[in-house]
Image: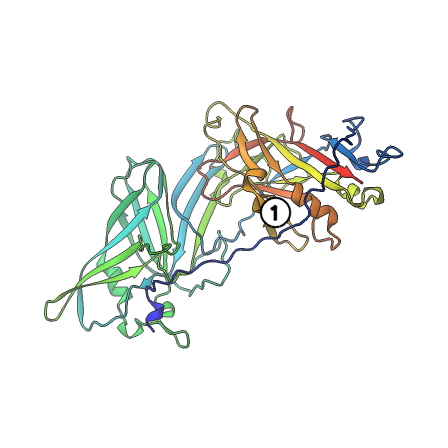
Amino acid sequence: MTRFYHSPDPSRRPSSGFILNNIFAAFLAGIVLLAASCEEDPTQIGRNLLPSGDSVSIMSTDTFNIKAWTMYSNSLQSDNPSTSYLGQLYDPYFGTTSASFVTQIRMGSEWNNDSIVIDSIKLYLNLLTVSGAVDKPHYLKLSEIDEEIYTDSVYYSARPVPLTGFSVSNILLPELQEDTINRIELDIPVELGYKILDDTSMLFYNDNIPDFRSYFKGLLFELTTIDDPIMVSLSLSPPSGYGTSANYFEFFMHDESDVSTQFYFIIDAVNRNASYNRYIHDFNTAVPEKKIPHRNDTSFFDTLSYVQTMNGVYTRIWIPGLEAIKNNPAMKGIAVNKAKLIMPIFYDDDIYTPKTIPSQLYLRYVTRSGSKYIVPDYSISSSFFDGKPDTTNAVYNLNVAAFLQGYLEDKTGRLKPELELFMNPASSYNVILKANNSHTPVKFEFTYSRF
């Protein structure tokens, strides 16, 4: 049974993606033909472009009229995260984002004690990032959850958390420092310890019968503040290699013979605890004249689109004309040489400046069944995919040649000429982009070889 405790064998979370081969066809040197006009109807691209006698031509256009909408869904998967967050963020455009997380705790070893008295409990947390009002008081609240959670189950970021009603709160955080790792030690009320140890016969692990995981199911971690908010992050992932856990409870106890002892409950255990992040977005707290005017409204083409951290709003992108190209018999077998989205950045010279935008954006595609995957260009080469801000030209460049080649070759009908622009939940900043009928709209550069 000791394999259930703090085992030294590391665990890894599997990852998946899809790989599309044959991304780029070989260029035949010396045979280059530029497109006669950049004003061509995008639904007619490639028609009657190959002069008689040529075997290969390379065509290029940037005339696609890209459509973009700001979308939001609170049903985004957030289980088994590598990083979890506590606190709040406020943005006058996006409103208030609150972050918390749910996790199991794991016994650090077998329980071999009899009658004990808990003298004190310490909670040690290794905060990877800290931002916000560090000079204000902030308080941790721990609430017992009322459902067993599992590492192989799916949990979403805005799902309600069933609670037993037991909690300990007003746990004051020490003074924190920004832009550095904070190793903190918190005094936890002993009531939590007695709650966990109420039935010591359940302090064991066994896959075949109810055990500690069904007895004490886990905790909801929340951070509250009276004044200005703060946001912190920590890792719930198992330590790598021969590393040790950094986030855990330590119980200081003594027995009937007054012999002192300690016992540990691990948060970032090697035998991974089930956990998930919770993000709650309140757009109504935004400044009225800056508030996002349209979410999930595909009937309206706003001049701006929005991308938010922590599973908030994202930008849906539709590329008209690609479906016509795919269905045009004259365009069968073309090889995509370049496909690049160019997303102009909006600055207000106050909150949104070149120094306060995310360092990386990502694109995912959605199948007709609703499944979402990051575009294969990023998996093949993150440097080729790009997605980083070009502050000189005030744009994000995102290369999607592999995705486009896969879309054109897809015979199953599962792919659509649509993409979703999003950011990693760990990003410190939101971003606003120009779109649709803006003076500097989104561009799509497409170069292909036709044989």
In the shown orientation, is residue 331 left or right of residue 114?
right
Image quarter (top left, top right, bottom left or bottom right) of the C terminus:
top right
Badge 1: few (under 14), some or many (20 or more) residues near its Cα, within 10 Å?
A: many
Question: In x, y percent, where is residue 34?
Answer: 77, 28
Question: In x, y percent, where is residue 57?
Answer: 79, 34
Most extreme residue toward the left is 257
Question: In x, y percent, where is residue 266?
Answer: 31, 59
Which is more toward the observer, 360 or 436? 360
Q: Residue at x 49, y 26 (%)?
A: 354
Q: Which residue is drawn at 53% across and 51% down?
A: 76
Q: What residue is shown with label 1? A: 376
In the shown orientation, is residue 428 left or right of residue 62?
left
- Whether residue 375 is visible here, answered yes or no, is no
Above or below, 192 relative to 202 = above
In the shown orientation, is residue 418 left or right of residue 156?
right
Above or below, 138 relative to 392 = below
Quadrant of residue 1 within the rendered picture: bottom left
Most extreme residue toward the bottom is 208
Above or below, 430 relative to 202 = above
Which is more toward the observer, 204 or 231? 204
Above or below, 256 relative to 304 = below
- Whether residue 134 is visible here, answered yes or no, is yes
Question: In x, y percent, where is residue 303?
Answer: 63, 30
